[in-house]
Amino acid sequence: MSFLDTYNPEHLTLTVESPTFWRVTFNNPPINVIGLEMMRDLKELLTELESNDTVNVVLFDSADPEFFIAHYDVEVDNAAAEALPSPTGYTAWVDITVRMSKLNAVTIAAIKGITRGAGSELVLAMDMRFASLEKTRLGQVEIALSAVTGGGASGRLPSLVGRGRTMEILLGGDDFDGALAERYGYVNRALPEAEFDQFVTDFARRVAGWDHQAIVEVKDLINKYTRLPDEEFPLHSDAYWAAVSQPKVGERVERLLANGMQKREPLEFNLGRDIAALTQDG
C-alpha cells in the first residue's frame, strides 16, 4: 500500500491537488496549537516527502480562518513528544523544523490568521510565506517567558529581515500584521483577502509544473548561501528548554492559562499586545 493509502493524520488534512502539488491543511481546534498529534502527523509527512521524487510543491494552509498556528501547546506531554521518531537525533520540534527546511519539494505557507511562537518558526522553516493583509498576525513571544526561540527563529530571521529587525521581533515580543511583515521581509508578500487564495494557489500550481530536478538544484544553491548548518539549531532548543525549566516560567504559564491562553478567548487574539502585562515582573 502507498503512503496515501495509510496516512491518517489527526490534526491536519492532506489533499492531493495533483501528483506534483499537495496541500496540507492544519486543523486542531480550538486555535490550532502544535501538540503531540500534530507533531506526529508532521513527522510522518516529512518522512514521505524526504524520499518522494514526484511532489514539487507542498502548500500549507489552515482550516481556521483566524488561527494559522497559534503556538506550541504549553500543556503538551514533552516526554511523549521527545519519544516520537527523530531521524536527525534532535529534539522533537527542531527535528521537524530542520527537516522541513531541507525538503526537495518547495514548501509554501499560505498564512491567514494568527501565527506565533512555534507557528512562526514553522513557517520560517518553509521556503516561502504569503500573508493575508487583513488577517495575518505573526510574532515570537518567547521573550515573555524569559526564553530564546527554541525552533530556530533567531537563526532564520536575520537572513530575511536583517539583524536590527530580528532584534525588534524577538525582543519586542509583539505582533506584526501582514503589511508590516511584508515590509520587513518576514513574508514574501501580503495580499488582500479577496485575492489571497487564488494568487497563492495559482503560484503553487505554476511552480509545481516545473521540472523536479531543476527545482531541487535551484533550492540547493539558494540553501547553500542562506541556511545555517543543521548543528546550529539544537543550540537554540537547548537554550529554550533550559530557560523554560525555571520555576518562574511555570508560574507565568499558569497565569497565562488562567487568563485564557489556549482558548478561543481575547488573550489569544491579542497575545502580542497583552502578554507583557501578564508576565513582566516590574
Image (cartoon, grey):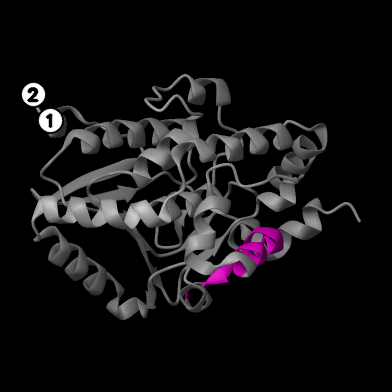
Count residues near mark 1 (Cα–Cα under 10 Å), then give few for <14, some for 14-19, many for 20+: few
Q: Amino acid at mark 2?
A: Met
Q: Is residue 59 magenta?
A: no
Q: Report if residue 62 is visible in the image.
A: no
* Residue 233 located left or right of residue 259: left
- Residue 84 in percent (x, y) is at 42, 22
The residue carrying mark 2 is: 1
Q: Nearer the viewer, residue 160 or 34?
A: 160
Find the magenta span and give its range: 165-178
Q: Nearer the viewer, residue 50 or 177?
A: 50
The residue carrying mark 1 is: 5
Q: Is residue 221 above or below residue 164?
A: above
Q: Amino acid at mark 1?
A: Asp
- Residue 1 in percent (x, y) is at 8, 24
Identity of the residue drawn at 10% across and 60% down: 210
- Residue 111 found in image quarter: bottom left
Q: Is residue 55 above or below residue 45?
A: below
